[in-house]
Amino acid sequence: MNSTATTPAKRVAPAPVGTTGVAIGGLIVVLWAMLLGFLLARYQPNWHSPAPYLLALLQTHLYTGLFITAHDAMHGVVSTNKRLNNGLGTLAAGLFAYNWFPGQLPKHHAHHRHVGTPDDPDFHDGHHPGFLPWFLRFAWNYVTWWQVLLMAATYNVLKLFFPQANVIAFWMIPAVLATLQLFFFGTYLPHRGEHAADNLHKSRSQFRHHLWAFVSCYFFGYHYEHHDQPYLPWWRLWRAK
């Protein structure tokens, strides 16, 4: 799914942030909340049909969108108003399994500054590490005990008011799947293995296929392009491919 050649990214001029980033980020938050509310409170799944599984995948996609919104806020491309930018980033990150935006912000910028080196918090320094050991190291760097405790407490509260199966299928499992999705397409595939000496960003990029790039991870399979032009919000990233 990823190209190994270092292909120069198409240069895309920065555009005024305006209100588009806030509108798109806000829409993702609203759609996530509305779908989750419906699935927990009103939906009665027939587990013998494909519908609940497709809805769980849709909720997973929206979970991924929450973190992508928080990620854009880390680069200041949601809003030029810093308070609004960071506020929406904090909200989106928090809704995704209680991720703490202020804590993740310096780590993400360290990843960009030191990509593929021991100072990169996303980097696994093992020799061609497999998916699982790298993911476990990644989770160790980013998941906090507070998140685990808050998720456990929220789960025990939610199941008092909603069917337990719905809470697991539509609140808990999509968060886990989205975490795996973000790691697989945003860290593991782009940064694994050796990189050519002229690859300044030590990143690979998915082959050009805009529909799959959006469905798989909001265009973050175009990862070399993101490192090359981090000022592009996710919804403009495809232009650099």
Image (cartoon, rainbow, N blue to C red):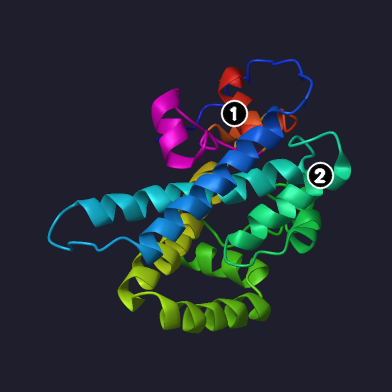
From the image, state whether disc 1 or disc 2 is nearer to you.
Answer: 2
- Relative image position of residue 192 (x, y in whole percent): 53, 48
Q: Dot 1: within a 10 Å radius of its alpha carbon, few (fewer than 14), some, or many (20 or more) residues?
A: some
Q: Is residue 220 magenta?
A: yes
Q: Which residue is mark 2?
A: 84
Q: Work out whether residue 122 or residue 27 is closer to the camera in this orientation and state it.
A: 27
For the point 60% across and 83% down, the residue is 149
Residue 172 picture quarter: bottom left
Instruction: Label 2: state its secondary structure.
Output: helix
- Relative image position of residue 93 (x, y in whole percent): 65, 57
Q: Which label number is shown at residue 235?
A: 1
For the point 79% across and 43% down, the residue is 85
Q: Amino acid at mark 1?
A: Trp
Task: For residue 96, say whether it is visible.
Answer: yes
Q: Work out whether residue 235 or residue 41 is closer to the camera in this orientation and state it.
A: 41
**Residue range (magenta):** 202-221
Q: Amino acid at mark 2?
A: Leu
In the displayed structure, does residue 98 sit left or right of residue 75? left
Task: For residue 197, say whether it is visible.
Answer: no
Quarter of the picture holding the N terminus:
top left
In the displayed structure, does residue 209 sit left or right of residue 32? left
Q: Is 220 above or below relative to 147?
A: above
